[in-house]
Image (tube, rainbow, N blue to C red):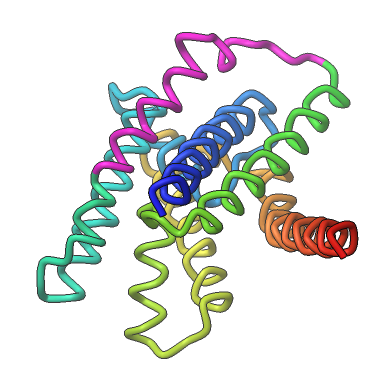
């Protein structure tokens, strides 16, 4: 059991890092970030925050909303604060310390390639964290709470949440920057492709398990 828990924790940490790397790659591609990253990205442009710090701030707000909606303190929700701070730190580690954010891509094909890599990394990170079944990250946590309150499916609630994030990003951009930023073709591709890629990783995992079972037999 302890060995199993260790594997879950390692899977979760790996997923957290891959998701953070995908977040940074979106900003590097300059074709628009995912709906999840759009609000922190805009905040980092007009506030004295790094992308990681803005992400942490946004995630903390999500957790506070969850607690208000639940009307009680739940450790499953409070523990998401830890994820918020760790994830923000990892984002800045890849973006600033390693310097991925400073990479200047000139050619369109390079931007498209990096954006596709961001989508792949994001989907894989989400998949690994879900499979680890450890602590929900704050965006998934707040979607889960809204899902229970509104009696909607997780998929529909997640779509509504992503759309709300995009609308907020556009509003903040127009108010504080005077033009729309962070939203682009990359955002649309993320909305369309992250889900199917998560399903692809699930399919590959199931296929691998079947193959292992056949070899065992």
- Name the quarter where the N terminus is drawn: bottom left
Is residue 125 placed above or below 144 in the rendered structure? Answer: above
Residue found at x 68% / y 36%: 118
Q: Residue 140: where, in percent of width, then height?
A: 43, 61
Magenta residue span: 82-106
Along the line of sight, which residue is nearer the eye, 159 or 132?
132
Instruction: Locate residue 131, reporting x and y percent.
Output: 55, 57
- Residue 40 is left or right of residue 94, and the answer is left
Is residue 84 on the magenta stretch? yes
Say left or right for 163 vs 58.
Answer: right
Closer to the camera in the image, 80 or 193: 80
In this rendering, the answer to whether 96 lies above or below 207 is above
Question: Which residue occupies 87% across, 59% down?
Answer: 211
**Which picture quadrant has residue 73?**
bottom left
Q: Position of residue 48 (x, y in %)?
A: 28, 22
Which of the 4 quarters of the picture holds residue 32? Answer: top right
Residue at 59% over, 15% down? 100
Give above or below for 186 relative to 80.
above
Direction bottom: furthest residue: 151
């Amino acid at each position: 059991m302890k060995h199993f828990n260790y594997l879950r924790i390692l899977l979760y940490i790996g997923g957290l890092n891959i998701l953070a790397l995908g977040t940074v790659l979106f900003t590097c591609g300059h074709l628009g970030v995912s709906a999840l990253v759009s609000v922190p990205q805009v905040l980092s442009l007009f506030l004295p925050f790094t992308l990681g710090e803005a992400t942490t701030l946004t995630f903390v707000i999500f957790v506070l909303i969850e607690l208000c909606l639940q009307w009680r303190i739940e450790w499953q929700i409070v523990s998401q604060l830890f994820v918020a701070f760790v994830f923000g730190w990892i984002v800045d580690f890849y973006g600033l310390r390693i310097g991925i954010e400073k990479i200047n891509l000139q050619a369109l094909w390079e931007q498209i390639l990096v954006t596709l890599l961001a989508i792949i990394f994001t989907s894989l990170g989400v998949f690994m964290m879900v499979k680890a079944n450890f602590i929900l990250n704050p965006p998934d946590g707040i979607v889960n709470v809204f899902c229970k309150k509104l009696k909607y499916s997780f998929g529909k609630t997640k779509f509504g949440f992503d759309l709300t994030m995009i609308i907020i990003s556009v509003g903040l951009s127009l108010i504080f920057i005077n033009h729309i930023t962070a939203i682009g073709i990359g955002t649309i591709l993320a909305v369309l492709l992250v889900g199917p890629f998560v399903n692809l990783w699930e399919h590959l995992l199931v296929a691998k398990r079947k193959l292992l079972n056949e070899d065992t037999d």
